[in-house]
Amino acid sequence: MSDITSQSLFELTSNIKEKKLSSEEITKAFINRAEKSKKLNIYVTDNFEKAIDQSKKFDSNPNLDFKLPGIPIAVKDLFCTNGVRTTAGSKILNNFVPTYESTVTQNLWSQGAILLGKLNCDEFAMGSSNETSFFGNVQNPVGENLVPGGSSGGSSAAVAANLTPVTIGTDTGGSIRQPASFTGTVGLKPTYGSCSRYGIVAFASSLDQAGPMTKNVRDCSMLLEVISSFDQKDSTSIDYKRNYYSRELSKDIKGKKIGIPKEYRVDNMPDEIEQLWKNGISYAKDCGAEIIDISLPHTNYALPTYYIVAPAEASSNLARYDGVKYGFRSPGQNLIEMYEKTRSEGFGDEVKRRIMIGTYVLSSGYYDAYYLKAQKVRQLIKKDFDDAFSKVDAILTPSTPSSAFKIGEKTNDPVSMYLNDIFTVPINLAGLPGISIPAGKDKNNYPLGLQVIGKPFDEQNILNISYALEDKINFKNDISDWWLSE
Amino acid sequence: MSKNSEYLIERENKQYEVIIGLEVHAQVTSESKLFSQSSTKFGAEPNTQVSLVDAAFPGMLPVINEFCIEQAIKTGIGLKAKINKKSVFDRKNYFYADLPQGYQISQYKYPIVGEGKVILDMPNGQKEIGIERLHLEQDAGKSIHDIDPNNTLVDLNRSGVALMEIVSKPDLRSPDEVNVYIKKLRSIMRYLGTCDGNMQEGSLRADVNVSVRLKGETEFGTRCEIKNVNSIKFMQMAIISEANRQIDLLEEGKEIDQETRLFDTKRNETRSMRSKEDAHDYRYFPDPDLLPLEISQELIEKIKSDIPELPDEKKKRFIDKFNLSPYEATILVSDIETSNFFEEVIKNSDVKLATNWITGELFAVLNEKNLEISQSPVSAKNLSKLINLIKDGTISGKIAKTVFEQMIDGDQDPLTIVKEKGLKQESDPKAIEELINKVIENNSDKVAEYKSGKDKLFGFFVGQAMKESKGKGNPQLINKILKEKLNG
């Protein structure tokens, strides 16, 4: 049997079900590795002691019908966890301990999983490199001083570094898929309305979705099956029949029509990304899929549209962090001064930047020119996809325009940082499911991902296409454990 | 409206007209809040009716309370208004300590209810006041500044309670019309059960928009908004004071600034709260946590079929069916409890007497004791018994008043009182004749005077006969027999 922490979720659940491993053994193995991996700065808050207690409790009376029997899982620190500090990567929530559980994490625990701890992320999920976190940047296990992507950077790094078998992240403009791409892991953003937003610290409500981040596609299907559920506590949650994604997983994609959008061939795209995409296309053909050239004409407008809609919603969503009720407060002589000091000291620069952008685009006199226009463009982007999906079953694109970059490389250039989301944001604006799978490496041996985009609620289809491609690509993430301490 | 009833403010030889529009905030009658399941019960200990949603904890989401939607539709139907099948909840963004989310969920561009109307019964006829819109929104919490000298305390019990904001057109022209308008609105909502209209508990408050213009002018003047006035009396005082302030400015050749003002009830004046330049930019945008609200025709029809008879229809029925005067009908339908009481009384008794007794004696008692009709010390059943005793001649109207006074004490049965106290009216002609004979015998000098032409003495004989009967003699009979005896 291979080392416990390098096993997939599928292997670990099989080993538990076949009683080859106990929950305690698995939990301790991940904790032990985490203790030696502090250099990566992946955990904001650990739950190790309680996790061991819970694993023992599981082992004393194991329910093997669970889908995640006694499996320890660390989650992004954007999910509210009952009794465990939840910071959203921000100073303003540094001391915040929820008395409630997010629906998505509750779904994990209801299927036997155990909380290992809370993973670092960009502050309020605003960032593409995990560098905006109040708790410091995260190291990408792929290489020293490399960003793990963001905002779910702690999550992608934790999966790549074998600190958790699987995890869940959130994706507002690419925050699951881009870090998955940067770390050679799998990340899926489900259709908007699939996974409940209840108990997830909100960034941009009309775009936020939770989703699985895993080592491989099969694990991804297993985890999606657990977290996706209709929830009356979220008015945007959609009641539809969800698949048994893992049971219905199939590599047979013969005859599937896969669209290749010409607008994703952006200026200055590195050759290796172009090559990666070509390889993906030829693998898809090998699997019997039909390749069809398509057009998504409004793609160019997706990024500016996103950077109006998301900050607008964020500026309002973050108004509740005012020092009055919970979280950080910096005292003032009066209410206004308390607000100003609390929010100036409690939020980081990127969050402040987006609050200001959002406040500006919603302001009287600017609303029509920015917010309203962005909403109209958003409809056009959505329509592009609707039109395309009348001809194809799925769309294949690169996940990101580059591989992981160095820590500090883009921190002074927000626009270049935002450009990282160019292939992922249109999918959030259209509310579609998208998955990033590792598909190759660049000249530095850094991973690169391909993105498969599906019709609404057609997660099964993009999982199946990814499953078939994964088999052909046969990606190996050789990570050297360079950070381990004794 | 006739000329002489116009409300005009005079300055030298000029006459100013006052233009008033109201934004009434009416608390929706509902067990739970607009977007959470917390109780809305009034008067609970501070911060005991607050859910995680109401306190805006991270990751908490609003879920619409469908009952509040139905209540708003119902109110819209009562205002003869258009129900919008699609409406949108927006966020109104501003910071305040008692606004936990940092925004209020309200409806801005697309309200649930569109244009409607309210009919006012004014002394000189009816007047129609246009309704611009009705929308749903959350109430904020309460900031308490006077408990702790150094801190403001916040009570979030109200936070998230459903309000209907009912915006009138600028159709009101006097403090009297405002009084009648608020009462009518309150009456309609109480008939519908959509708002209890309790102003002491803050269930009904209003922002008052006031402008003035010279009589005959057709353009509106610059208006000022007086925020959050919580009684009709204060609204009227605020309007008079604000209109005069504006007229004074105009008379001095100054301009009126469009601004938001507060009414200081102690000094009876309005003062500036913030100017137009300082006006909040609320940055309204559709709340992404809530889908647009879509209402089916079926739901509207279902609610329509449950709408009770409303004051205007009831008034018409009372006039047509019971032959009441418009004045009497207006009084009786103004409050649903009153009209119910009236209809209960007339089930088994005379309409005319019931009308007089309810609007006369009963209202006097309620006023004196400061009671609502629902707390009436005399039940409808016993009042109708009393009326029947008058009607069938068992007691006179005068005796009835004595009986009524006793009924107030513990809602006693009038028949029991009449029996116990021996108050039954003497209607036997023989007995009456006997006592009249006695009176004539004892007052032969007065009889002579009467017969010689002193007609006024007739009243004296009636009084003596009544006295002789210990007040129980049937007055009609006494009159009749006395006349026969004296004139015969």
Image (cartoon, rainbow, N blue to C red):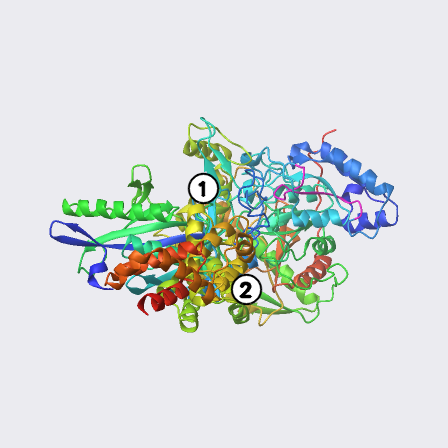
On residue A353, the disc is 1
Q: Do labels 1 and 2 share a chain?
A: yes
Give the residue number, with chain letter if any, for mark 2.
A261
Chain letter for mark 1: A
Q: Find the magenta span and give its range.
A: A69-84
Farthest residue in the right direction?
A19
Q: Where residue B416 sits: x, y (%)?
A: 56, 55
- The relative height of residue B111 versus residue B242 in the rendered view (above or below) is below
Q: Where residue B337 sits: x, y (%)?
A: 49, 58
How crowded is the residue under tag 2: few (<14 C-alpha within 10 Å), some, or many (20+)?
Answer: some
How crowded is the residue under tag 1: few (<14 C-alpha within 10 Å), some, or many (20+)?
Answer: some
Q: What residue type is labelled 1?
A: Arg
- The relative height of residue B9 versus residue A484 in the rendered view (above or below) is below
- In-image side of A228 versus B43 (left or right): right
Quadrant where the image shows the C terminus of chain B = bottom left
Q: Where residue A388 sits: x, y (%)?
A: 55, 68
Q: Classify mark 2: helix, strand or loop.
A: strand
Can residue B284 be seen at all in this image of the molecule?
no
Towards the viewer: A91 or A321: A321
**Mark toward the start of the polypeptide (1 vs 2):** 2
Counting every numbered tag in the picture gives 2
On residue B483, the disc is none
Chain letter for mark 2: A
Q: Where residue B79 sits: x, y (%)?
A: 42, 64
Tell me what residue is drawn at x 59 percent, y 58 percent.
Answer: A192
Quadrant where the image shows the N terminus of chain B = bottom left
Q: Distance between the residues labelled 1 and 2?
A: 32 Å
Tell me what residue is drawn at x 71 percent, y 37 percent.
Answer: A481
